[in-house]
Image: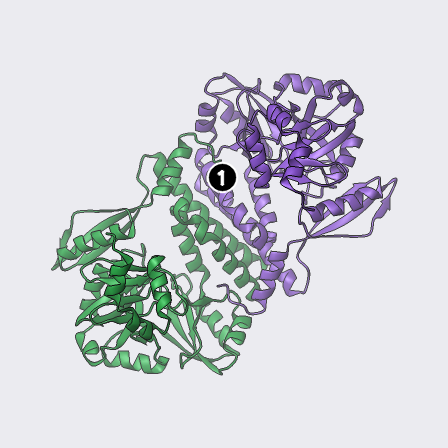
Chain colours: A purple, B green
Amino acid sequence: MRRDVSELENKLEIAKLSGLLGIPEHSISGALKRKTLQFVHGKRELFRFDKPVSSVEGGTSVFLEPLEVVRGFPKISRTLMLYPALIKHFSSIKKVVVEEKMNGYNVRVALIKDEIVAITRGGFICPYTTEKANDLIKRDFFRDHPDLVLCGEMVGPDSPYVPKTFYNIESLDFFVFDVREKNTGNPMPVNERRKLMDEYGIKSVHLFGEFDVGEVHTAITGIIKSFGNTLREGVVIKDPEMNIPAVKYTSSLSNCQDLRYAFEFYNDFGRDFFFGRVCREAFQSVEWDEDEESARKRCRKLGESIILPMISTIRKKKAGELIAENVQIRVKNLTTVSEFEEYLRLLGIDAVFETPEKIGDEYLIRIKKIHQSTNDKTQTILGGQMWS
Amino acid sequence: MRRDVSELENKLEIAKLSGLLGIPEHSISGALKRKTLQFVHGKRELFRFDKPVSSVEGGTSVFLEPLEVVRGFPKISRTLMLYPALIKHFSSIKKVVVEEKMNGYNVRVALIKDEIVAITRGGFICPYTTEKANDLIKRDFFRDHPDLVLCGEMVGPDSPYVPKTFYNIESLDFFVFDVREKNTGNPMPVNERRKLMDEYGIKSVHLFGEFDVGEVHTAITGIIKSFGNTLREGVVIKDPEMNIPAVKYTSSLSNCQDLRYAFEFYNDFGRDFFFGRVCREAFQSVEWDEDEESARKRCRKLGESIILPMISTIRKKKAGELIAENVQIRVKNLTTVSEFEEYLRLLGIDAVFETPEKIGDEYLIRIKKIHQSTNDKTQTILGGQMWS
């Protein structure tokens, strides 16, 4: 659906938006022209920033009548070497807080025109996640705090974006790791935020504690090692006052789990996933001063995470199977299913929805996401095509 | 050194070159303008094609007075699955020849204006390889066949381009795998070529034999497995008449050896080297129908080839060492050293030459090639910089 830039500009109240975002009007018109600021048609019309524009984060959503902004969730830097990076990054403070980084998908929940909506990392409203958020978050929180945005992780087996889960969650659950103001995006200090969530019975991600900046690397090493084989993802290290940006660090098992996923669909994701993750492994091994046996064990796990899923994919294709990622959703309203189907089409995701299965008062829908590039590449090589 | 396009055009005798290459004059002028066809200043002036231009291979060199062309060595396609690929590729013939693919660097040797010169894959004259070629190849061959180009692999410990060697060679040796005509690039049939080399006492790469197209995949599997731990690289499968392009296939050990090299200098080479090689591993495992134990062994070796060299690089940098690749050359004339130094500068390679060491009637020169990107990245991460 195409629209004139001038028509979009009229819709947007650019002067007012310029004030809300703190960037000049011409930056907004320019972003509209370049389609970095895109109009998203849907049940609830909005604009989204596809990429960052000066100080405005990518994934920022702009709602209309009244004009309101939910800022994109800020990118969190990653450290490969805990000690030097944390000492340097948090040099102006004494203590930091360590919270869990969970393996789900990042969602911002906000009250827009008296309705609770769930916004994905990209700045779209996800109709499925919105149904779930309405179930999980009681309205009293937003009645009292309509100006706040809950930023958290959606985790559980009924996730259409994350294929596997390792937490003891029945369907999908929401864990808050940030509360921010609408429009400004200003964050709330960690303890205040956790207390506020407790008051309203909203779950927060796990808190490992507060540590001295000079010692937190040892604590994190202990935390990561204590994860053992549980596939918990990692940690986020935060300034308690939230004045300094947070930093993330992940476990080797989680790196390998990502690689296993990426190399099952190697021609779709393999290249992008690979390089950063092997660097994490190598630097972690050096920082932890591993002996040869531990390093070799790490190598074996890395190699297995890459090659075994590829072998399995090639064998499947050889046997005539379709290479697809199996996910599922669970809804109360079947209209959510068709809205979600439409939404995936909008995102360009190729997905096959199976017939809804009634379970209690809900419907379970299995979805096959087709990764076409891996299907095609594997098929042509099995058919005798050269690599290049 | 900049030159006018029109000045270069005058130098080139474009009409005549157009005839020799079989491409229109405007393609040649266009390539000159875009600098795809570049003038190379040096002891012996030449033009080289930086990339393919219609039917002309990248790395093609054009010599002046008289105008002569040494065609770039054609890119050889790689198969990941022997059986389906070979059956399809060689469907119009019954028998194929299998020769060894050695681990060295590709060189074309030709007689230009009464001098033997050695041309690298990129179409440059390498002064070092030229000295070696003049030692290794007796002039009687070119006296009798001034119109032929010897294409072969330079292999041995005194190689400035390949850091390690696994053949029982004292300094550097040359193994011919193709003989082609100047100007046209037409290849000689395999048996005729091998016989001709024998007559002049020039070495050829190892011949594994001639096989039926329908059975050669089994033979190659046996050959590759027989390499064991010797690090021989792989094979090239050829039409005996050389009418159909050749196809290459490499061993897992050679893939892993490449990865070990690439990940020692991970930020310079890791990304480019990685993806194709893991795909080779996975498809080979499926084609060979490996059991779980063999597949896991393959995974372990892959993982170790990636992570162990990175760990070693990070540790070296942590200890304050420079990350560099150690190679060496051995020359009779010290002028070759300064010419080679200049040549590496022209290629943009950062190299430190140590003082020549006299050994017999020759000089050994150790060279450190500095891979700056890996040095810088490792240093900044050790210094506490975030990954991104």
Q: Is residue B345 left or right of residue B221?
A: left
Q: Nearer the viewer, residue A193 or A218?
A: A193
The picture places residue A328, in percent across and down from the top left corner, at 75, 46
Q: Is residue A128 left or right of residue B338?
A: right
Q: Can residue B358 be spotted in the picture?
A: yes
Residue at 66% in and 32% down = A12
Residue at 57% in and 24% down = A22
Q: Nearer the viewer, residue A23 or B230?
A: A23
How packed is label 1: few (under 14 Cα within 10 Å), some, or many (20 or more)? many
Q: Nearer the viewer, residue A258 or A134?
A: A134
The picture places residue A304, in percent across and down from the top left corner, at 55, 50
Residue tagged 1: A280
Amino acid on which the number 1 mark rests in the picture = Arg
The picture places residue B128, in percent across and down from the top left corner, at 21, 59
Q: Nearer the viewer, residue B171 or B60?
A: B60
Q: Secondary structure at mark 1?
A: helix
Q: How many marks?
A: 1
Label 1: chain? A
Residue at 52% in and 63% down = B284
Q: Quadrant of residue A242?
A: top right
Q: Can residue A75 be spotted in the picture?
A: no
Up/down of A220 relative to A304, above or below: above
Q: Quadrant of residue A19?
A: top right
Q: Quadrant of residue A57?
A: top right
